[in-house]
Amino acid sequence: MKPDQLAEQSYPDLRGKRALVTGGASGIGLAMARAMHLQGIGVAIADLDGDAAAQVAGGLGGDAIGLRMDVRDRASVEAATAQAIERLGGLEIMIANAGVSSMRPALELTDDDWNFNMDVNARGVFYANQAAARHFVKAGTGVIVNTASLAAKVGAPLLAHYSASKFAVVGWTQALARELAPRGIRVNAVCPGFVRTSMQEREVAWEAELRGMTPDEVRADYIGQTPLGRLETAEDVAGVAVFLCSGAARFMTGQAINVTGGVYTT
């Protein structure tokens, strides 16, 4: 799905709402921010690279803002969330998307490898969800979408620490959804597969070296595992995230939706 195709999927109930997207300056987060904006949603793009977030926001238009946020730091998350609420005039949607990866055999993992993935992928979702949900509870409504992974459904060799962090996202999503459902707040996750992004390019290079393959062979392996027969795009994920925020998904909460092209179907 190309970026302009996202506008063809119209959810009128989303127009005028406000969303905060973490990790929104590149990759899947950028596609999500664009998709939200195309629905008439005011978007706060939060990223560790505040300059990149501001540049993306400037390209989207006047109802988009860029913020610096370090999802590993509670004070940074809470300050940026408060700023988003103030500048947008409210907040109804939290997209906790910021994520990282690294690759190494499980028995060679270091504390730094483990902490890097857990701090961003798991703790970052925890902080962002809490900051938004406390506002949503006061408002009596809100939607949270967390970015998990195919690796949150099936443990991935060479990505054991990454898988652990993304399994944590799914467990947190399910538990939080059950707690917040009586407050009118829905919480879901998307689980992308082999998405063509700059993050994947790094992973392809790492995996090629670790498996003694060429990068093209690694990509061919990814495509071979995907029944729909191509690499996923960030827009493929963004379309599902927008759906989950809309009234069309009003009776969905606690779900971890596979967006994998059929790689994993459970």
Image: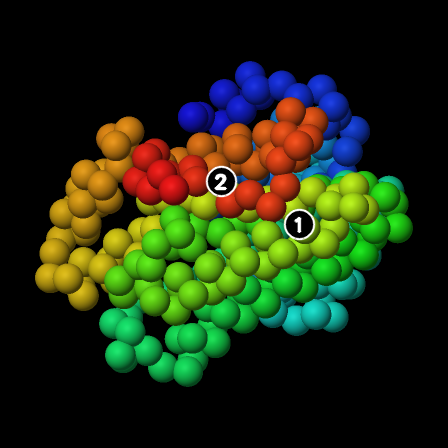
* Residue 63 percent location from the top left of the image: 75, 35
Spot occupied by residue 68 in the image (x, y as percentages of width and height): 67, 59
Looking at the image, which residue is at 52% across and 54% down? 170
Q: Amino acid at mark 1?
A: Ala
**Does residue 217 sit above or below 128 in this rendering?**
above
Task: Give the quadrant of the N terminus.
Answer: top left
Q: Is residue 20 visible?
A: no
The residue carrying mark 1 is 177
Q: Disc 1 or 2, which lies upstream in sequence?
A: 1
Element marked by disc 2: strand
The picture places residue 30, in percent across and down from the top left corner, at 54, 42
Residue at left offset 49%, top offset 40%: 257
94 relative position to 17: left or right: left
Task: Give the CA distance from mark 1 to mark 2.
Answer: 14 Å
Q: Residue at x 32, y 78 (%)?
A: 109
Specify the amino acid type for callout 2.
Ile
User: Residue 57 falls in which quadrant of the image?
Assistant: top right
Task: Say whether residue 161 is left or right of residue 181.
Answer: left
The reply, left or right, for residue 266 in relation to residue 69 is left
User: Looking at the image, which residue sits at the far bottom?
Assistant: 111
Extreme residue toward the left, this view: 212
Q: How many marks?
A: 2
- State if disc 2 and disc 1 touch (CB < 8 Å): no
In the rendered view, would you say 18 is above or below 214?
A: above
**Residue wearing tag 2:** 257
Q: Residue at x 63, y 41 (%)?
A: 253
Please, what secondary structure does the residue beneath circle 1 have? helix
- Circle 1 residues within 10 Å: few <14, some 14–19, many ≥20: many
105 or 263, which is in the foreground?
A: 263
